[in-house]
Image: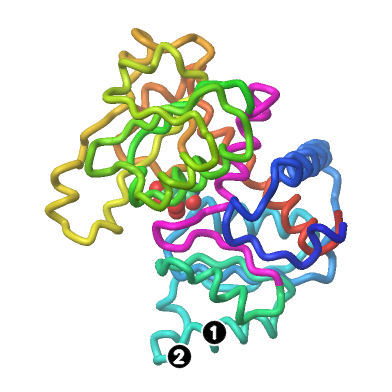
């Protein structure tokens, strides 16, 4: 209990393998209880603040559902335009108010380091729900939890991470999360302009993660157990012409999967997708991204309960 109570969640690297496995056990227990329709009042009397300065569908709503399933109340906003930030209030003052009105703050912001900064200003625990292109730790937690449910373990598998590894915080956090486990191999499949940033690359290499750069999806697909696909993060490109060079540069079609993938391959995607996965994949055995999105609720419920000392 001590270990989790009141902690901030800024990066997936803040957590050990043992802590992540402990979290997955708690998520699994809650998933079963909630699946049986049990009313869990673990967080009764608590208020969770959802401070989303950037757009979100799954992350915000699954945090809200998770809090409410455990009997907590939520307050918050879903766009910076809805706050006094538009009147010129600074981020620190906004955070002080959230800190005063709630027991835990979930925050998404387009600035890198915003969550770390909030964790320094606030006394209550802060969960980073995405800070610019940098971190999205709870996404990585639910991604790794999904792999655990599908395969029984994160270890020993061959992964392909496809897409925008440069600006994508979900892909980055997933890769950083894999360093806490023992995958057999991790293929990075990205157009040259979207390769991981040096600072991410050096953490991956330094951790001994068996990363290999792949020239094409087709070439590595036969080996993969998990294909993690991501959207090109158009809104984070400093120059729209750079985006034009890479738009539509990869697409996972049913045809490619049927020709090259093992039947056991599972495709993950943090969503939203634009055009990088053909909708014809949705109804097939390969598709695991809707399960992944659903598992956001028990995983985030477990995290809230642990940080608030209820599990
Ligand atoms: C991701 C994000 O916001 O980083 N979405 C999510 O939280 N599931 C991925 C994305 O926007 O592409």
Is residue 79 placed above or below 40 in the rendered structure? below
Q: Where does the image place residue 37, in percent across and percent down from the top left? A: 81, 41
What secondary structure is marked by label 1? Answer: helix
Is residue 47 placed above or below 237 in the rendered structure? below
- Asked if residue 11 can be seen in this view, the reply is yes
Question: Where is mark 1, residue-wise?
Answer: 94
Tell me where the magenta segment starts and ends, as one range.
125-154
What secondary structure is marked by label 2? Answer: loop
**Disc 1 from disc 2: Cα separation:** 7 Å
Q: Where does the image place residue 293, in percent across and percent down from the top left? A: 56, 41
Q: CB under 8 Å between callouts 1 and 2? A: yes
- Give the residue at x 84% y 65%: 44
- From the image, which quarter does the C terminus lie in? bottom right
- Give the residue at x 59% y 61%: 10
Question: Where is mark 2, residue-wise?
Answer: 89
- Asked if residue 41 can be seen in this view, the reply is no
Q: Nearer the viewer, residue 277 or 236?
A: 236
Q: Nearer the viewer, residue 31 or 228?
A: 228
In the image, taking residue 66 as reference, residue 121 lies left or right, namely left
In the image, taking residue 71 as reference, residue 231 lies left or right, namely left
The numbered mark, 1 or 2, whose residue comes first in the sequence reads 2
- Give the residue at x 43% y 49%: 200
Q: Is residue 131 magenta?
A: yes
Q: Is residue 23 magenta?
A: no
In the image, taking residue 208 as reference, residue 218 lies left or right, namely left
Number of numbered labels in the structure image: 2
- Give the residue at x 28% y 29%: 251
- From the image, which quarter does the N terminus lie in? bottom right
Quarter of the view holding residue 128: bottom right
């Amino acid at each position: 209990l001590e270990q989790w109570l009141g902690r901030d969640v800024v990066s997936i690297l803040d957590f050990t393998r043992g802590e992540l496995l402990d979290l997955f056990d708690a998520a699994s227990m809650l998933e079963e209880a909630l699946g049986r329709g049990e009313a869990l009042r673990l967080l009764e009397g608590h208020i969770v603040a959802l401070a989303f300065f950037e757009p979100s569908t799954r992350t915000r709503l699954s945090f809200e559902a998770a809090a409410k399933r455990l009997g907590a109340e939520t307050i918050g906003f879903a766009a910076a335009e809805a706050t006094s930030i538009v009147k010129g209030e600074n981020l620190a003052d906004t955070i002080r108010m959230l800190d005063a009105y709630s027991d835990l703050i979930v925050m998404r912001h387009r600035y890198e380091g915003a969550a770390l900064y909030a964790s320094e200003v606030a006394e209550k625990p802060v969960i980073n729900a995405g800070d610019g292109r940098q971190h999205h730790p709870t996404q990585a937690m639910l991604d790794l939890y999904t792999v655990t449910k599908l395969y029984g373990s994160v270890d020993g598998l061959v992964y392909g991470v496809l897409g925008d590894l440069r600006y994508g915080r979900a892909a980055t956090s997933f890769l950083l999360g894999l360093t806490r486990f023992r995958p057999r191999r991790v293929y990075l499949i990205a157009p040259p302009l979207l390769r991981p940033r040096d600072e991410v690359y050096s953490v991956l290499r330094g951790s001994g993660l068996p990363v290999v750069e792949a020239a094409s999806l087709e070439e590595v697909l036969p080996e993969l157990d998990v294909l993690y696909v991501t959207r090109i993060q158009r809104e984070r490109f400093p120059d729209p012409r750079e985006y034009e060079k890479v738009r539509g540069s990869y697409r996972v079609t049913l045809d490619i999967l049927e020709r090259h993938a093992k039947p056991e391959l599972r495709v993950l995607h943090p969503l939203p997708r634009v055009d990088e996965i053909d909708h014809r994949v949705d109804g097939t055995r390969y598709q695991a991204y809707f399960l992944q999105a659903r598992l956001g609720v028990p995983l985030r419920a477990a995290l809230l309960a642990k940080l608030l000392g209820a599990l």
